[in-house]
Amino acid sequence: MKIIQCISSLKKKGGGTTFFVSDLSYELGKNGINVSLISQFSKNKDPTFRDLYLPVQERVKIEFSDYEKNIFNKIFATSYRSKLIESIEKNVNLIHITGLWEPSTHAAFSLARKYSIPTIVSPQGMLEPWAINNNFYKKKNCMVPLSTK
């Protein structure tokens, strides 16, 4: 079995979601499941791997896409999308997406639908009223397409 774990960042300062996804990937690998953990990383913004929380397990493959340089690529997460397609083409059984509001999250969800791959979405508190009201208009634009289907 192969699972893709999708998260926008593995920075330690990212808090609970970073530790959750890294620890889950480690435990899945320890139990014989192959995991591709796909996240974003920039040598310019993140100078060292010491700032990241990475699971060390032989069955966990960590893949990074570069942060996007121009606004068009950032909005559509083109680098992240390319990494996902590479990984999806290697026979994936499940995609686990952590988070909701990042372009990388949308890219993962849309590719999972396109390739008909079963998907688990872990919003991690991002649907709480206080979270939705923070940057409400940005999030409202994301919610409209979801609510019409």
Image (tube, rainbow, N blue to C red):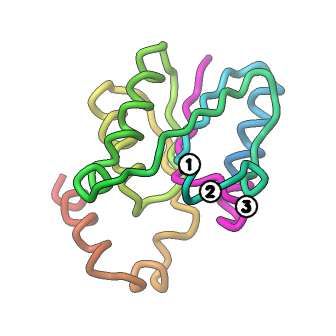
Circle 3 SS class: helix
Q: Depth-wise, is mark 3 or mark 2 nearer the camera?
A: 2
Circle 1 SS class: strand
Amino acid carrying label 2: it is: Asp
Q: Are marks 3 and 2 in contact (CB under 8 Å)?
A: no
Judging by the rendered image, the residue that carries numbered circle 3 is 12
Judge left or right: residue 15 versus residue 68. right
Judge left or right: residue 98 versus residue 117. right
Residue drawn at the location 50% of the way across and 34% of the way down: 95
Residue drawn at the location 43% of the way across and 31% of the way down: 84
Q: Quick check: is 11 in the magenta stretch?
A: yes
Query: Which label belongs to residue 41?
Result: 1
Judging by the rendered image, the residue that carries numbered circle 2 is 46
- Distance between the alpha carbons at the discs numbered 1 and 3: 13 Å
In this view, the residue in front, 51 or 60, is 51
Q: Quick check: is 87 in the magenta stretch?
A: no
User: In the figure, 131 relative to 73: above or below?
Assistant: below
Q: Depth-wise, is mark 1 or mark 3 nearer the camera?
A: 1
User: In the figure, 133 relative to 53: above or below?
Assistant: below
**Percent from the top left, x then y, of residue 100?**
43, 59
**Percent from the top left, x then y, of residue 143?**
27, 65
Amino acid carrying label 1: it is: Phe
- Distance between the alpha carbons at the discs numbered 1 and 2: 7 Å
Q: Read off the magenta span.
A: 1-19
Q: Are marks 1 and 2 in contact (CB under 8 Å)?
A: yes
Q: Nearer the N terminus, badge 1 or badge 3?
A: 3
User: In the figure, 79 relative to 32: above or below?
Assistant: below
**Percent from the top left, x then y, of residue 55?**
78, 39
Amino acid carrying label 3: it is: Lys
